[in-house]
Image: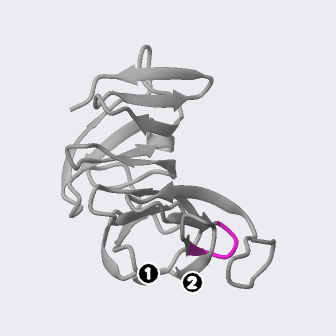
Amino acid sequence: MGRGYANGQFRNPNGITVDSLGNVYVLDLYREDVQKFDSSGNYLLKWGSKGSGNGQFETPDGICVDSNDNLYTVDDYNMNVQKFDSSGNYLTQWGSSGSGHGQFCSLSCGIQVTINGIVVIADAACNRIQEYSTTGTYIDEFGRLGLGALDNADFLAIAPSGNIYIIDGIKVIKVFGP
């Protein structure tokens, strides 16, 4: 794994996740692709290119995997979430620019899937966390700018208990899970 444009190399990796078989997926901001490696680090495949169509990225910024080994990527410029199977086949996407339900102000690296199959996404510029089904149906949101609320929620992690931990500016917030 070197630095460049050849398969197995990176330009600016900024997202990583591991599936149930130990395969490693790396999201690269500058290459605008996802590369898959086996658990020993051997290159297996890649997908994605620059653009706004299905399976394309422009400023991809986060990646996670669900219990069925489907992958979810967030794209800050295209303001969407895309879902792929573990072979890189495009399945669906959702989101658009805005502050309403199902819209994003600014996506960040913060995307995870709970053990209950809820996709949890940090929408940093809107100071909120949004929740979706694995098919992209909007469920709920929490947070908003203000006293005792979120202020630049960017990264998140989900514990096995279902609790959500959010890096919000310079503090970590614990939220009891769904």
Residue highlighted by disc 1: 55
Question: Mark 1 or mark 2: which comes first in sequence?
Answer: 2
| x and y percentages locating residue 160 in the rendered image | 32, 33
Image height of 78 relative to 113, above or below? below
Badges 1 and 2: C-beta atoms under 8 Å apart? yes
Residue 30 among those drawn in magenta = yes
In the visual, does 14 lie left or right of 38? right
Look at 40% across and 80% down and name the residue there.
Answer: 87
Residue 155 location, x and y as percent? 52, 39
Of the 4 image quadrants, the one containing the C terminus is: top left
Query: Which residue is pictured at 19% across the width and 44% down the height?
Result: 116
Q: Position of residue 162 (x, y in %)?
A: 28, 31
Determine crowd level at label 2: few under 14, some 14-19, many 20+ residues with C-alpha closer than 10 A: some
Nearer-the-camera pick, 71 or 53: 71
Q: Quickly name the residue at label 2.
A: 49
The residue furthest right is 3
Query: Compared to 9, does 132 lie above or below?
Result: above
Q: Nearer the viewer, residue 163 or 54?
A: 163
Q: Please provide the residue range marked out in magenta.
A: 29-35
Amino acid on which the number 2 mark rests in the picture: Ser
Q: How is the image coloured?
A: one colour
How many marks the image carries: the answer is 2
Q: Secondary structure at mark 2?
A: loop
Examine the rendered structure and indicate whether residue 128 appears above or below residue 64: above
